[in-house]
Image (cartoon, rainbow, N blue to C red):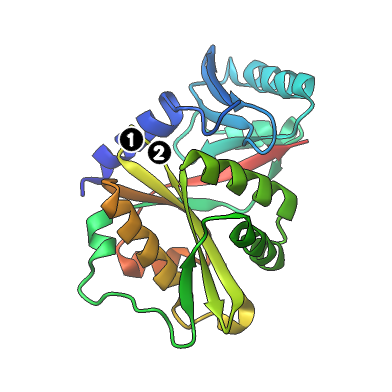
Amino acid sequence: MNHDEVLSLYERRFRHEPAPEMPGAVVERVGAVVRQSGPAPCWNGVLWSDLDERTADAAIAEQIRHYAELGTEFEWKLYGHDRPADLDRRLLAAGFTAEPPETLMVAETARIAAPAAPAAEPEGVRLVPVTGMDGVELMADVHERVFGASRVRIRERLAVQLAEGSVVAVLALAGGVPVSAARMDLHPGTEFASLWGGGTAPEWRGRGVYRALVAYRAREALARGYRYLQVDASAESRPILTRLGFAALATTTPYTYG
């Protein structure tokens, strides 16, 4: 895998020329900024910018005005190679809050789906696909418990994605109790499927649950013809993904406002 070529492809598909992520979402290029706006549970925020020291502050102010008019909080997804070099400090000065940094990681789907030593389901755990609202509720339970995330937002998003056929969702059950959950967003017309979630209950960490969930989704992506898997990896998941064969392409930090 040529890292520079794959990063360039990712930038084009998801930052320069992205498709709206769900019905009701609008992607637009305004000056030197590409942003997405839409009603909940849509993600609202800035995907890409081409700014310099002269234009950055005005562009930041314009995005704040835009989302304030919509009455929604939003995120500026800042990559380590974005310019100007002090864009992070300008965002903080404008009132944004920096979330923990993440690492953009990518792997060839076939490599993860069919490794030399396939990842088996951990003893006592079975993986179950989510196909309806009962499974969605269990996923919301897991995400709320592990990540502290809003179950309402997760439930709404998954319900829309399942109806659209744009997601693969899976639960890890131990004795019928959900101990982890993950999803894979499908991006038709691109070479990428993206992995999200995978947070595991503390008592089940270190037993291979996360690895099994990655392998499960990789097999599903391969069956659907997606060449690459993409992850915005936390500091905790990056070492695991590296061992599985994912490569780091860039760093990214979410800056939130509102």
**What is the CA distance from the residue labelled 2 to the residue labelled 1?**
6 Å
Q: Residue at x 46, y 42 (%)?
A: 166
Numbered badge on residue 187: 2
Frontmost residue, 104 versus 59: 104
Q: Which residue is mark 1?
A: 190
Frontmost residue, 192 versus 127: 127
Tell me the SS state at disc 1: loop
The image shows residue 40, relative to residue 233, as above or below, that is: above
Numbered badge on residue 116: none
Q: Residue at x 47, y 48 (%)?
A: 167
Extreme residue in the bottom direction: 123
Q: Residue at x 23, y 66 (%)?
A: 114
The quarter holding residue 55 reads top right
The quarter holding residue 58 reads top right
The image shows residue 28, relative to residue 156, as above or below, that is: above
* Residue 190, position as x, y percentages in the image: 33, 35
Left or right: 79 in relation to 248: right
How crowded is the residue under tag 1: few (<14 C-alpha within 10 Å), some, or many (20+)? Answer: some
Tell me the SS state at disc 2: loop
Kind of residue sitting beneath label 1: Thr
* Residue 252, position as x, y percentages in the image: 51, 45
Kind of residue sitting beneath label 2: His
Is residue 45 among what the camera can see? Answer: yes
Frontmost residue, 84 versus 151: 151
The image shows residue 190, relative to residue 209, as above or below, that is: above
The image shows residue 69, relative to residue 104, as above or below, that is: above
How crowded is the residue under tag 2: few (<14 C-alpha within 10 Å), some, or many (20+)? Answer: some
Marks 2,1: beta carbons within 8 A: yes
